[in-house]
C-alpha cells in the first residue's frame, strides 16, 4: 500500500463534527470533537482505500487548488 493524499471537508454543527472525503464516494464520518472526527475520517479513508485495492479498483485522488470560506449577505 502506498501513500495517498485526499481532500477532507470538516463541518461543525450543534451535534459535533461531520467529515467527508469528496474523492471517495460514501466515505464520511462524525465525531464529538475536531480531533475525534479527524481520526475517524483517517480510519474511514484507510478502510475505503484498502477495500478498493483488494478489489483491484482504482483509487482516485485529486489536487486541491483552492478552498475558501466566504460570507455572503443577502
Image (cartoon, rainbow, N blue to C red):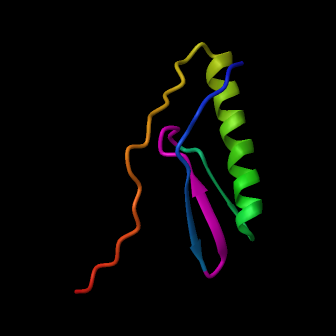
Quarter of the image where one finds residue 57: top right
Left/right placement of residue 43 relative to residue 27 reads right
Who's the residue at 74% across and 52% down the image?
40
Who's the residue at 61% across and 63% down the image?
18
Q: Nearer the viewer, residue 23 or 67?
A: 67
Quadrant for the C terminus, please: bottom left
Left/right placement of residue 13 relative to residue 16 reads left
Quadrant for the N terminus, please: top right
Query: Does residue 1 belong to the magenta stretch?
Result: no
Horizontal and vertical percent position of residue 58: 52, 19
Left/right placement of residue 29 relative to residue 23 reads right
Horizontal and vertical percent position of residue 10: 57, 61
Residue 69 in the image: above or below residue 21:
below
Residue 18 in the image: above or below residue 1:
below
Q: Nearer the viewer, residue 4 or 49?
A: 4
Left/right placement of residue 1 relative to residue 66 reads right
Horizontal and vertical percent position of residue 9: 53, 56
Q: Given the current orientation, which residue lies at the most extreme bottom position?
A: 74
Horizontal and vertical percent position of residue 27: 59, 44
Magenta residue span? 14-25
Who's the residue at 66% across and 25% down the image?
3
Amino acid at each position: 500500500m502506498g501513500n495517498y493524499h485526499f481532500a477532507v471537508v470538516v463541518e461543525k454543527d450543534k451535534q459535533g463534527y461531520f467529515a467527508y472525503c469528496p474523492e471517495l464516494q460514501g466515505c464520511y464520518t462524525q465525531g464529538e470533537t475536531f480531533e475525534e472526527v479527524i481520526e475517524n475520517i483517517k480510519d474511514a479513508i484507510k478502510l475505503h482505500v484498502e477495500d478498493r485495492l483488494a478489489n483491484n479498483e482504482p483509487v482516485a485522488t485529486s489536487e486541491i487548488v483552492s478552498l475558501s470560506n466566504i460570507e455572503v449577505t443577502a
